[in-house]
Amino acid sequence: MRFPTFPEFLFAMSMVFFIAFLSAFNSELLDGEPLCELNLLSEQQESCNLNDYSYTNFRLVVHSGGNSKTVTTKVPISIIIRTDDEAIKHESILPKAASTGAGRKYHSNLNYGVYDLPKGSVTISVIANDSVKRFSLFNAKILKNANNYYVHLLGLIFLVILFFSIYNRQSIFVNGIGKPLPYILYFFVVLLVVTWAL
């Protein structure tokens, strides 16, 4: 029985942390505690009042459903966060990451990002673009206190271990212009991981 080499062990560990990273992110999208739910299909603008001062941020997730014609449709959303003193606007936001089913009908969970909350009583208004009318389901959830820390930590550990796995396998890389190829691919992996959960 052959034991794995050190670079192979590092690569296997990086895959473990990669799976943990994706699981943590998907768990937050699917199982996060909603402060309120807004049906943007019947009304393209809905509002939510928050009076609990302990919340510092929120994540906006949309559960959508449609058909094969809406698979590639991205609905821009605008968010207005109002307090007694100010109105903070985030306009024309597109989903940052999605879990999508396949077939003629599908459901998806769209991540529209994390937003800071000012202190005090807050009203959050969510406005969908007209293209939302093409969907059969478009429910927005405002999830309390998005916990990006654990998601980013797991992603960082994955990237560090993967880098050392590549570095320790340099002896098997082809020479010449192909030698930097694994590092170029690693760069694109870094971009994917860094932008996935933002």
Image (spheres, rainbow, N blue to C red):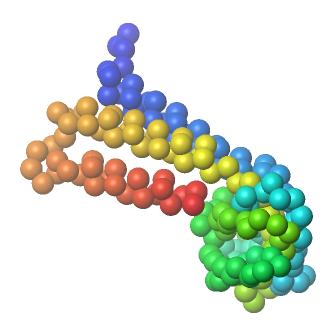
Where is 43 relative to 17, above or below? below
Front position in the image: 34 or 22: 34
Please name the residue shown 24% across and 33% down the image: 169
Front position in the image: 157 or 165: 157
From the top left corner, tell me how far across and down residue 40 is, in percent. Answer: 84, 78
Instruction: Residue 90: name its quadrant.
Output: bottom right
Judged from this view, the residue extending furthest toward the top is 1
Q: Is residue 9 left or right of residue 120?
A: left
Instruction: Residue 81: name its quadrant.
Output: bottom right
From the top left corner, tell me how far across and down residue 157 is, in percent. Answer: 47, 38
Judged from this view, the residue extending furthest toward the bottom is 130
Front position in the image: 92 or 137: 92
Task: Work out whether residue 69 can be spotted.
Answer: no
Please name the residue shown 80% across and 85% down the image: 133
Q: Is residue 38 left or right of residue 89?
A: right
Number of on-image labels:
0
Task: Work out whether residue 167 can be spotted.
Answer: yes
Where is 31 relative to 48, above or below? above
Where is 46 relative to 162, above or below? below
